[in-house]
């Protein structure tokens, strides 16, 4: 007997082929096509569409890794996401060297609580973190990557210099351990501390470690604005030299002066593919980014740690020097102040010790408190010890559409999850918005092709076995939705609104979401990379 029968639905199987009317069964967490047996429960899919569960190609869910907390599950599963690929932008909760614990705690400040931060000390390598992750009740599935910034910090803290040969060997050893225990690859965040201090050769040498395991290199590149094309070239060079597949993370062109550069970056991608490099792009469907507020500052300021920087920011003379550097054009670093045409385009989403700034642009907050834009920003940095998140409005719709429509683009939220402060709407809306905007509103591609971009294509490029398709024997990760209703609801004012139109979500055959809320089922699994 089948566990569940879903009948009379329109099945969009994730392959890109046209949908068809049909039924399917679920047995022992697997899909059974053309079921003829009786079932323990029957779901009527009349008027609804059944798709594979969506796969978030670029997730930061592990930044608060506690899937037992409902809000961390709800934001993704309510959109139909059943699998998260985590450890992105060079950040992962492992490896942690005891002597550099405080440094790594500072890097992973988006962990919500002291308890979560304290737990880091046990994640001395991937095997220890994996044991913890597998012990937790999970509503969805997780595939893990090792973050380069944390890897570097475990070995050499946040020093602004090249790694010594001995330090590089330590990094390689940590990374090899992770790959041997099923990690999917290496990610970098080359605008963040301390990844920004690494050179190209360091990344090549680390990618050579993941190559024999079939590992993937995913990168938040060194620049997404003035020297975007050069950053794409570096990413391709690293992957091509090491012989590994490449993911270009949350691809975009930031700053008015750089709008239209997607034409050149996509040309570079296709030229590399023509040479045999496997290149994938992930993207979220929004015109504003979200990251930490301190990335507006020149990265060299962080070399001696945040405590020293906070003291420096209290000095009026130092403020003048830093302001001059931030205003300098052409920019000497990935300068989001310039990319957003000033502080009016930078909206504060979290501010631990100055909550009255939340929801305002830095410029509007400055007016509210009667300060100059720069003094208000520097004061926020001092009072929040350089913590806090912001949205950066810096992108163009034509680039957004061109990147999404590329045949090598998949969908990733890049969403950072917090317990109670405003978040970027992508955290709650990415997958519904991608379909609503590109498919339903702009009619740029058929629904079936849009579904493929967030199911089977993602699974194929990451090497996720038995995911992303409605096919016999595949994992029964499924979303039952009303196509006409399916749409995002969150925006930059109402950031935590659930997507509309999702009726049921199944993970490994069990219902984890229905009637607008999570069930008590926790059938999620840790997915490990299959041997090459």
Image (cartoon, rainbow, N blue to C red):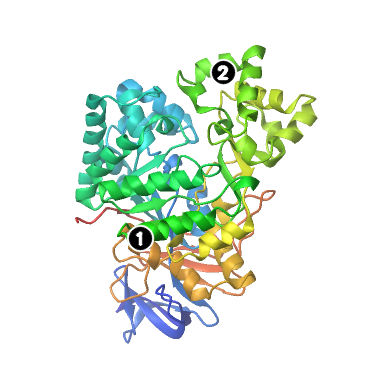
Apparent side of residue 248 relative to residue 377 in the rendered image (left or right)? left
Q: How many marks?
A: 2
Is residue 326 positioned above or below 77 on the image?
above
Apparent side of residue 488 relative to residue 306 in the rendered image (left or right)? right
Residue at 49% x, 68% y: name it. 504
SS for tag 2?
helix
The label on residue 273 is 1
Residue at 72% x, 28% y: name it. 373
Q: Callout 1 environment at 10 Å: few (<14), some (14 to 19), or many (20+)?
A: some
Q: Earlier in the sequence, mark 2 or mark 1?
A: 1
Q: In the rendered image, which quarter contains the N terminus? A: bottom left
Residue beneath label 2, please? 310
Mark 2 or mark 1: which is in front?
Answer: 1
Residue at 57% x, 62% y: name it. 401
Residue 358 x/y as whole percent: 68, 36
SS for tag 1?
helix
Q: Callout 2 environment at 10 Å: few (<14), some (14 to 19), or many (20+)?
A: many
Residue at 31% x, 85% y: name it. 37
Is residue 447 positioned above or below 168 on the image?
below
Residue 279 x/y as whole percent: 37, 57
């Amino acid at each position: 007997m089948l566990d569940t029968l879903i009948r009379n639905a329109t099945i969009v199987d994730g392959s890109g082929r046209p949908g068809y009317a049909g039924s399917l069964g679920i047995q022992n967490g697997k899909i059974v096509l053309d079921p003829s047996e009786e079932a323990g429960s029957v779901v009527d899919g009349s008027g609804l569409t059944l798709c594979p569960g969506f796969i978030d190609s670029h997730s930061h869910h592990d930044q608060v890794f506690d899937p037992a907390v409902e809000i961390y599950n709800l934001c993704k599963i309510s959109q139909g996401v059943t699998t998260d690929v985590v450890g992105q932008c060079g950040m992962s909760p492992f490896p942690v060297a005891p002597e550099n614990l405080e440094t790594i705690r500072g890097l992973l400040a988006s962990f919500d609580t002291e308890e979560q931060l304290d737990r880091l000390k046990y994640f001395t390598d991937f095997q220890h973190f994996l044991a913890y992750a597998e012990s937790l009740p999970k509503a969805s599935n997780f595939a893990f990557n090792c973050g380069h910034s944390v890897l570097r910090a475990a070995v050499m803290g946040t020093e602004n210099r090249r790694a010594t040969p001995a330090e590089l060997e330590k990094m390689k050893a940590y990374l090899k351990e992770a790959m041997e225990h099923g990690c999917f690859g290496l990610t970098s965040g080359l605008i963040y501390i301390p990844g920004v201090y690494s050179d190209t050769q360091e990344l090549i040498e680390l990618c050579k470690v993941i190559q024999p395991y079939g590992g993937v290199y995913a990168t938040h590149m060194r620049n997404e604005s003035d020297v975007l094309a050069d950053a794409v070239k570096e990413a391709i060079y690293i992957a091509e030299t090491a012989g590994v597949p490449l993911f270009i993370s949350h691809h975009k062109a930031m700053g008015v002066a750089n709008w239209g550069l997607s034409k050149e970056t996509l040309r570079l991608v296709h030229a590399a593919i023509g040479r045999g490099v496997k290149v994938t792009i992930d993207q979220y469907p929004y015109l504003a980014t979200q990251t930490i507020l301190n990335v507006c500052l020149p990265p060299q300021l962080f070399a001696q740690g945040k405590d020293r920087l906070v003291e420096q920011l209290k000095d009026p003379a130092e403020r003048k020097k830093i302001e001059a550097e931030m205003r300098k054009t052409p920019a000497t670093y990935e300068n989001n102040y310039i990319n957003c045409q000033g502080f009016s385009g930078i909206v504060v989403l979290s501010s631990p010790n100055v909550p009255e700034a939340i929801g305002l642009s830095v410029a509007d907050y400055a007016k509210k408190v009667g300060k100059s834009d720069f003094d208000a920003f520097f004061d926020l940095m001092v009072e929040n010890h350089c913590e806090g998140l912001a949205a950066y409005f810096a992108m163009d719709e034509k680039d957004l559409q061109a990147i999404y429509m590329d045949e090598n683009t998949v969908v990733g939220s890049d969403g950072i999850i917090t317990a109670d402060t405003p978040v970027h709407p992508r955290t709650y809306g990415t997958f519904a918005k991608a379909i609503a905007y590109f498919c339903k509103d702009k009619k740029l591609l058929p629904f079936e092709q849009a579904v493929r971009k967030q199911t089977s294509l993602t699974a194929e490029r990451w090497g996720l076995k038995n995911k992303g398709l409605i096919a016999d024997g595949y994992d029964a990760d499924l979303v039952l939705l009303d196509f006409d209703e399916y749409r995002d609801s969150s925006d930059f004012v109402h950031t935590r609104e659930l997507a509309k139109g999702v009726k049921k979500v199944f993970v490994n055959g069990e219902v984890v979401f229905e009637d607008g809320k999570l069930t008590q089922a926790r059938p999620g699994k840790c997915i490990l990379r299959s041997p090459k």
